[in-house]
Image (tube, rainbow, N blue to C red):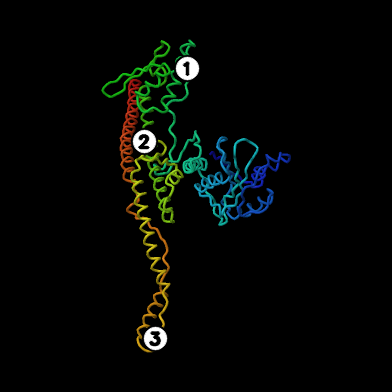
Amino acid sequence: MIAFSNTGTGFKGAISYVLKEHEKYLPFEKTPNLIEQNNIWGSSSGQLAKQMRFIADSNSKSSRPVLHIAFSFHKDEKLPLEKSLEAMHLVLSEINFDKEKNQYILVKHNDTDVEHYHWVINKVDLDSRNLDTSYIKNRLQVACDKVEKKLSLRYTKGRTIIYDPQSQKGYSFTKKEHSKKKIFHDKSDNISGTKQFIFDELQRVLSSILNLKNLEGELLKKGIECKTTFNKNGLSGISFCYNDQAYKGSQIGCKAKDILNVIQQNKITNFKYQIAQLNGFSSKINFSIKDIVKDYENGNLYPDFKKHFKANQIDYQDDALFYKGYGIMNKQVENFRKASETCFSAFVNEYEFKNHQYNELMKQKPEDVPVLFGRNKIIEENNVLLFEQRIAIKPQLKIQINIMTIPDFAGSFLKRVQECKKQLAELTKKEEQFLKININEKHNNGRDVKTRIRR
């Protein structure tokens, strides 16, 4: 999902554009559809713009009250309209758009293969408050990334800023690639072609590897031999050989320290991904268990465990639960199932017993009162019976699952997450040390140059 935005001063022009009023002879199937409009009436750009302008003029500080946002979805992602609307409304709520107080129209365009929508929003709401659109492009990128993950939509590549729940700010900028695309211009086509091939394959492999051993193995698949040299501080040099031509890393454009830095970044990204996935796995298990408990308490003795877990993207197997490549033993869940069925049966038995007592009580009728002997006793017993029948409440079957039997996976996940965070902290610390060394090297090199100039 991609969102583009701009602001302006003219409502009529923006509305006319999204309604395609300037294209009068569009085929019916390519005519735009007005999907939603809020706090405005009419269908022409003139009518709608006039109402928006009236509200916009209530805030003299809003110099550009028109906000136009275009959403597009991947051409291979065929979503029902309800899902598309849910995604867009969630994104807009992330930028503090209030669909109840802001005037807007939502139009779907049908003139391309890509599903896309246009919003024209009045930044000034009905309370004369102005919607903050500072850094709107970055905020929309973060919001789209967050909603894609929340609704399991197709991932959009190429964002410069993404949603990051681990960051205090809630977002992080994507790291620049370790090296820009390089083109070699050697005099010999054979040399330049070989260098280019090695460089391109190196770039491809470095995008995902987590250690040097994998680097060597992956390059060897393409016939590239990778040789490394080490000293007491670790990797000190790297060279490549292909087609009987050998080059140092510096000749290819990737020195040893550059490669180490990329591997370091890959590891950091990998641990952050693991932490996010483990936290997501834990949350989705809790959601599934809550739904199962609710099913039991609604009177279903045999909830469909697989269905509830599948609704939360978890594959429920006989011995384990799996989520996006991660697994955990489900013995706790099976124990929970048995305990819940026992608990369920106990509540049913108790209900049946109480219901039987209630029915027996309500069946009883007062005894006939004798004229002489035992009259007072019978009257008293009849009064007691009538009182008990009057205050008796018909039993209701109410299932309540014992909270002590509900499985808690938090400890298992916490341990794994803490291990990842510990390793991530160590890597981050090494990264900071690496950056300090580079800064010191540059500083010392600059000082040496100044000293030579003075001499």
Label 3 to label 2: alpha-carbon separation:
88 Å
Residue 61 percent location from the top left of the image:
56, 51
- Earlier-in-chain disc, 3 versus 1: 1
Q: Are marks 3 and 1 in contact (CB under 8 Å)?
A: no
Residue 284 percent location from the top left of the image:
41, 45
Looking at numbered disc 1 in the image, what kind of residue is underneath it? Answer: Phe
Point out the frontmost of discs 3 and 1: 3
Label 3 to label 1: alpha-carbon separation:
120 Å
Label 2 to label 1: alpha-carbon separation:
35 Å
Q: How many marks?
A: 3
Outermost residue, left side: 232
Residue 105 percent location from the top left of the image:
62, 48
For image coordinates 39% across by 48% down, the residue present is 286
Residue position marked by numbered label 2 in the rendering: 271
Residue 32 percent location from the top left of the image:
66, 43
For image coordinates 40% across by 22% down, the residue present is 218
Q: Secondary structure at mark 2?
A: helix
Residue 355 or residue 370, whichever sits in front: 370
Residue position marked by numbered label 3 in the rendering: 370
Point out the frontmost of discs 2 and 1: 2
Residue 318 or residue 245, whichever sits in front: 318
Residue position marked by numbered label 1 in the rendering: 184
Q: Quadrant of residue 316?
A: top left
